Amino acid sequence: MTSASHDEENTEGTDPVLRSQGVVGGISIGTLTGGAVAAGPSARAEDRSHRSGQPAPTGSPWPPTAPPSTPGGISISVMTGGAVASGTEVQALDQSIQRIEASTELLVAVRVLREQLRSVDTGAETAELGAQLDEAEEEITTTGLVRRDRLQRLRERLELGTSTVAGLSSAAALMQQIAQLSGLG
C-alpha cells in the first residue's frame, strides 16, 4: 500500500516567513522507482511494499545529481523505496521489506567469514556476528534472496567490529559484496 497526500491550499501552521513568500516547502527527486512522497502542511507518506530483486533500471545517467530543492524542502538524487514527507505536520512511514537477489559470491563470503570467526574469538560480539551470518546464510540458501536490512545490519556490525574481526580478509570481502548488491557502499 502506497499513499501520499498534499494539501496545497492550506498553508496554516507553516513558517510565517516562508508562507509570506508563498513557499510551503517541497520535495525534488531525480529518479523514483518506488516509495511514497508527500509535501505540505498536513503531509503524510507511507510505503509498506514488499519488493524482491534489484530496483528497476532507470536508464538515467549514473551517478545522478540531486535536483534543486525549494527553500525548506528536500532534494533526493535517487529514491528506490521508502517514505519522505516535508511540511508542518509531517509523518513518514516505511515498513517495507526489500529482498535482494543474493549472489553466489555473497553466500561464499558469508560462509568463509563465519568459518574464520569460529577459529579466532569466542566473545559475545563475535558470537552475535556469527548468529547474524547464520541467519543470512539460511535466508540465502532457502530463498536465493537476502533482506536489505539484514545486509545493512551486517555491514554496521563489521564496521564496528573488534580488531579481530576487522583484521580478517573475509570481513573485507563480505563488506565488498554487501556494497555491490545493496548500494550500501
Image (spheres, rainbow, N blue to C red):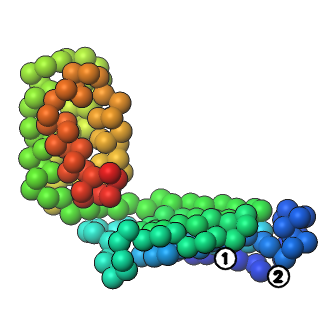
Classify 185 as above or below 69: above
Describe residue 77's horizontal placement relative to residue 23 as left or right.
left
Reading the image, the residue beneath label 2 is 9
Residue at x 9% of width, y 38% of height? 112
For image coordinates 43% across by 62% down, the residue present is: 96
Location of residue 22 in the rendering, given as x and y in whole percent from the top left corner: 84, 76
Give above or below for 98 relative to 175.
Answer: below
Instruction: Count neighbours of disc 2 (C-alpha within 10 A) and say few if under 14, some if 14 to 19, many if 20 or more.
Output: few
| Callout 2 amino acid | Glu
Tag nearer the camera, 2 or 1: 2
> 16 or 37, which lies in front?
16
Q: Which residue is mark 1?
A: 5
Q: Quadrant of residue 57?
A: bottom left
| Mark seen at residue 143 | none
- What residue is at 20 percent from the left and 39 percent from the top? 172
Query: Which quadrant of the figure has residue 27?
Result: bottom right
Above or below 171: residue 26:
below
Whether residue 7 is visible here, answered yes or no, is yes
Of helix, strand and loop, which one carries label 1?
strand
Q: CA distance from mark 2 to mark 1?
A: 12 Å
- The answer to whether residue 114 of the structure is visible from this angle is no
Label 2's element? loop
Q: Amino acid at mark 1?
A: Ser
